[in-house]
Image (spheres, rainbow, N blue to C red):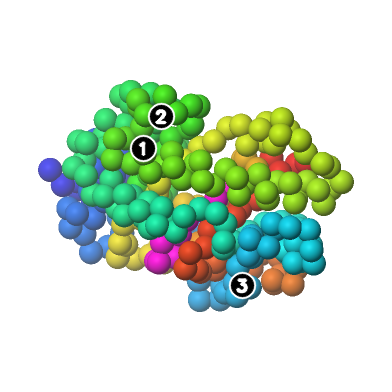
Amino acid sequence: MAPNLEDRNSVFEFVVRQGNGVKGLVDSGLSTVPEAYVQPPEERIDKENAIKYDLPPIDLSKLDGHGPDHDEVANQIVRAVETLGFFQVVNHGVPLHLLESLKVSAHYFFSLPPQRKAVYLADVSPSPLVKYGTSYIPEKEKALGWKDYILMQYTNDDEALQHWPQEIKELLLEYLRSSTGMVKKLLQVTLGNLGVKPDDSMIDVLIGKKMLSMIFYPICPNPDLTHGVGRHSDIGTFTVLLQDEVGGLYVKIEQDTGYGKKGDWILIPPTPNALVINVGDMLQSI
């Protein structure tokens, strides 16, 4: 039964507790965003005045070798890490056909019947390392986020093959293996700029905890009133993000830079074949 969109408790029960998610809410039919999802004005992004990120993606293939191209690309990475904290990379070593397959598999998973996804709700999931949900802490959020997600923490292949969703686990493990080498390169360059020559054991510690998530943002009737994921920072070293063609990623400038003034928002548009790299809290603290 569709929820009463004017009753927050009814919406919460349908979306969160029953596991229908925002997709189920949209599929039930609605023409406006329910009040439970309306963000306060100070949390909304002024999209019309946002700056468009227009720097070309960094070509990581030029890190292979020790010539001037290597040094220039290393400098580009360091500048991005020290200023905006976000940058795009191409020729990253992750097969392009795999990236396209991941997009398809994500849409397939979130199109599954609600009862198939709800088996991964926190209270019933077969593993505490696998969680399906909508807002990250819906019980405490003043306004819910317009998204559904499946989150998986990696420990080893056996655990992943046993507990991750059947529809996506093989592709996600392949992506994890393919992207790890790229992350190691980025850490070597970044730490090298600090005068640190990391060995394999140090790199393993910095990337020891691996988490993968797929996030789905259903079509929204009033996108200016809400958002999918609110302002936040990531806790790890690097987050590797694959955007689809829709876009919608904004980064807030924390200090005056060549990109803009403190407090400005920058739109990071999707670039074909590129991955977005986000500097996490752990790396910033080094």
Earlier-in-chain disc, 1 versus 2: 2
Q: Main secondary structure of the magenta part?
A: loop
Q: Position of residue 149 (x, y in %)?
A: 38, 44
Q: Amino acid at mark 3?
A: Pro
In the foreground, 55 or 28: 55
In the foreground, 84 or 180: 180
How many residues crowd mark 2 within 10 Å: few (<14), some (14–19), many (20+)?
many
Q: Position of residue 162 (x, y in %)?
A: 35, 25
Whether 141 is drawn above or below 95: the answer is: above
The residue carrying mark 1 is 169
- The residues tagged by marks 1 and 2 sit, at their Cα atoms, a distance apart of 7 Å
- The residues tagged by marks 1 and 3 sit, at their Cα atoms, a distance apart of 32 Å
Circles 1, 2 touching at the beta carbon (< 8 Å): yes
Residue at the image position 32 percent from the left and 31 percent from the top = 120
How many residues crowd mark 1 within 10 Å: few (<14), some (14–19), many (20+)?
some
The residue carrying mark 2 is 160
Q: In the picture provided, is 7 more to the left or to the right than 285?
A: left
Span of residues in magenta: 238-248
Q: Position of residue 22 (x, y in %)?
A: 29, 49
Residue at the image position 48 percent from the left and 32 percent from the top = 153
- The residues tagged by marks 3 and 2 sit, at their Cα atoms, a distance apart of 36 Å
